[in-house]
Amino acid sequence: MNNSSLLFVGSAVLLIVSNVVYHTSQKSVPPTVNPLESIICTFFIALALSVVLLPIFTDINNLTFRHFNWANLLSGISIVGIVVGHVLYYRAGWSLSSGTLFSYVAICILLIPVGLLLFHERISLYKISGFIVSVIGLYLLTRN
C-alpha cells in the first residue's frame, strides 16, 4: 500500500471512528449540563490536544497564522453550531442511529449543489442515482 492509499484509508478510518465516538459522547451529555458549558469543555480539550499534536503536523519554529481567511471564521462559527446543535438534537429526542443518519444524508444532499456551483465538481449518473436513493431514504426515515 503506497502513502497515498494509506492516507486515503487512514483519513477515512479516523473520520469514521471519531464521528462514532463524537456522537456517542454527545448523546451521553447529561440533560442537566448547560450546552454552552459542555461546548467550552469540549473545545478546551480539543485546543489542548491540537497544541500537543501540532509538532507532528508542522515545524513549530516556522509557525505562522498569517494565511487564514474567511473560511477559518466560518468554520469556527459552524463548529459551535454543530456541537450545540447535536447536544440539543439528542435532547429533543432524536435517536443516535436514525437521527444521525437523517442529518448526515440531509447534509450530503445539500452539499451537492455547493460542490457543483462553488467547487466545479462533476456529477455522474451514479451520483444522481445516489442522490435519488438518499432523498427516498430521508422520506422513509421521517415516516412513522
Image (spheres, rainbow, N blue to C red):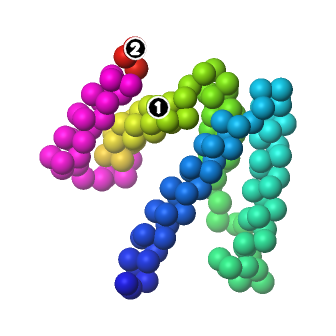
Along the line of sight, the residue nearer the viewer: 22 or 105 = 22
Magenta segment boundaries in residue numbering = 118-141
- Residue 21 seen in render: yes
Helix, strand or loop status at disc 2: loop
Q: Position of residue 37 (x, y in %)?
A: 84, 36
Q: CA distance from mark 2 to mark 1?
A: 12 Å
Q: Residues within 10 Å of mark 2 (few under 14, many from 20)?
A: few
Q: Earlier in the sequence, mark 2 or mark 1?
A: 1
The residue furthest left is 125
**Residue positioned 45% across, 36% down in the render:** 101
Query: Callout 2, which amino acid?
Result: Asn
Helix, strand or loop status at disc 1: helix
Query: Callout 1, which amino acid?
Result: Ser
Is 45 above or below relative to 85?
Answer: below
Is 6 above or below relative to 134?
Answer: below
Along the line of sight, the residue nearer the viewer: 23 or 53 = 23
**Residue positioned 63% across, 28% down in the render:** 90
Residue located beneath label 1 in the image: 98
Dominant SS of magenta comes to helix
Is 21 above or below relative to 37?
Answer: below
Residue 144 got which mark? 2
Report the quarter where the N terminus lies.
bottom left
Q: Quadrant location of residue 8?
A: bottom left
